[in-house]
Image: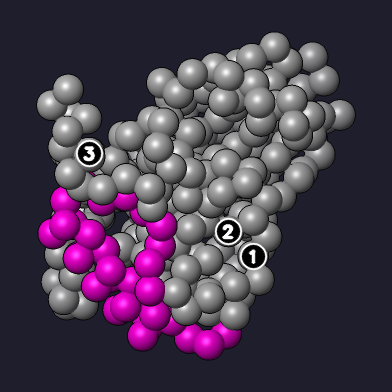
């Protein structure tokens, strides 16, 4: 079975459409989403409506939870006070754009989903199974992944939040970071997602990069009064500290250490 795993669409409809076209072209049997459909980008209602139309199973991301619950913060770490202020402005703008129906739908998304495929179980979540806003970075020590595998007991773990694409294998457990559909890092102009090839004998993971209409997104960001940098600023790589417990001063001190 071939399964596409998408995450961190961040209200970027052209990127989502390009990925769905690619998923169709390579013949995936299913699509799973690890959350953060909205926030940062200019198309929150359109993205939610398209995901709902396609009936894609979705775990709730930290942006989805914040907007669904009417919160003033998302729990994300930002690289600077300026980026943080832009993020909060995007949160407020998105809250004013989302329809009541779509807000309610985001609020009711599950924080984790367990799927069965070819005699295996897969757990889909955004950050970690316990915290939507905790980061599982690629270089995090193996004991963090091993603890999740031991606690949950699944064969496959699919997640997002870091915007990284990677696979970690610990024993029989496969950890798959799906990357970001709509929010690449500096100089990254492609939508990224993961593909699982699952059989009764093995799990193989691949990653795909897809071009999309950058100019259309830039025009829509400008029309909404949102800085394009919101879709270019990646999460802060601070591997051992959960969001909300680190200050900008301590981040700077860590970088200089």
| Mark 3: secondary structure | helix
Q: Which residue is mark 1?
A: 109
Of badges 3 and 2, the one in the foreground is 3
Measured as percent of width and height from the top left, residue 68 is found at: 53, 74
Image disc number at residue 251: 3
Question: Where is 142 relative to 7, above or below?
Answer: above
In the image, what residue occupies the spot 77% across and 22% down?
199
254 lies left or right of 182: left
162 lies left or right of 109: left
Question: Where is 63 relative to 193, above or below?
Answer: below
Measured as percent of width and height from the top left, residue 233 is found at: 22, 48
Quarter of the image for the N terminus: give it: top right
Q: Residue furthest right?
A: 119
- The answer to whether marks 3 and 2 mark residues whose Cβ atoms lie closer than 8 Å is no
Q: Residues within 10 Å of mark 1 (few under 14, many from 20)?
A: some
Question: Where is 99 relative to 139, above or below?
Answer: below
Residue 88 is inside the magenta segment: yes
| Whole-number angstrom distance, CA of label 1 to CA of label 3 | 32 Å
* Principal secondary structure, stretch drawn in magenta: helix
Residue 209 is inside the magenta segment: no
Q: Is residue 31 visible?
A: no
Q: Which residues are magenta?
A: 72-101
155 lies left or right of 236: right
Q: Residues within 10 Å of mark 3 (few under 14, many from 20)?
A: some
Measured as percent of width and height from the top left, residue 196 is found at: 62, 30
């Amino acid at each position: 079975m071939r399964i596409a795993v998408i995450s961190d669409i961040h209200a970027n409809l052209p990127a989502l459409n390009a990925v769905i076209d690619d998923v169709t072209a390579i013949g995936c049997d299913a699509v799973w989403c690890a959350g953060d459909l909205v926030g940062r980008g200019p198309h929150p209602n359109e993205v939610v409506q398209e995901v709902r139309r396609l009936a894609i199973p979705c775990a709730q991301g930290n942006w989805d939870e914040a907007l669904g619950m009417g919160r003033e913060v998302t729990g994300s770490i930002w690289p600077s006070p300026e980026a943080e202020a832009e993020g909060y402005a995007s949160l407020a703008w998105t809250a004013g754009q989302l329809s009541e129906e779509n807000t309610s739908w985001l609020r009711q998304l599950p924080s984790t989903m367990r799927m069965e495929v070819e005699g295996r179980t897969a757990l889909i979540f955004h950050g970690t199974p316990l915290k939507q806003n905790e980061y599982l970075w690629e270089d995090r020590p193996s004991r963090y992944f091993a603890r999740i595998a031991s606690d949950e007991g699944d064969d496959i773990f699919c997640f997002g939040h870091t915007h990284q694409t990677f696979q970690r294998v610990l024993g029989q457990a496969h950890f798959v970071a799906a990357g970001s559909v709509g929010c690449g890092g500096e100089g990254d102009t492609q939508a990224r997602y993961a593909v699982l090839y699952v059989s009764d004998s093995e799990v193989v993971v691949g990653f795909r990069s897809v071009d999309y209409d950058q100019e259309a997104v830039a025009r829509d960001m400008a029309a909404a009064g949102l800085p394009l940098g919101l879709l270019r600023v990646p999460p802060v790589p601070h591997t051992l500290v959960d969001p909300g417990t680190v200050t900008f001063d301590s981040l700077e001190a860590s970088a200089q250490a």
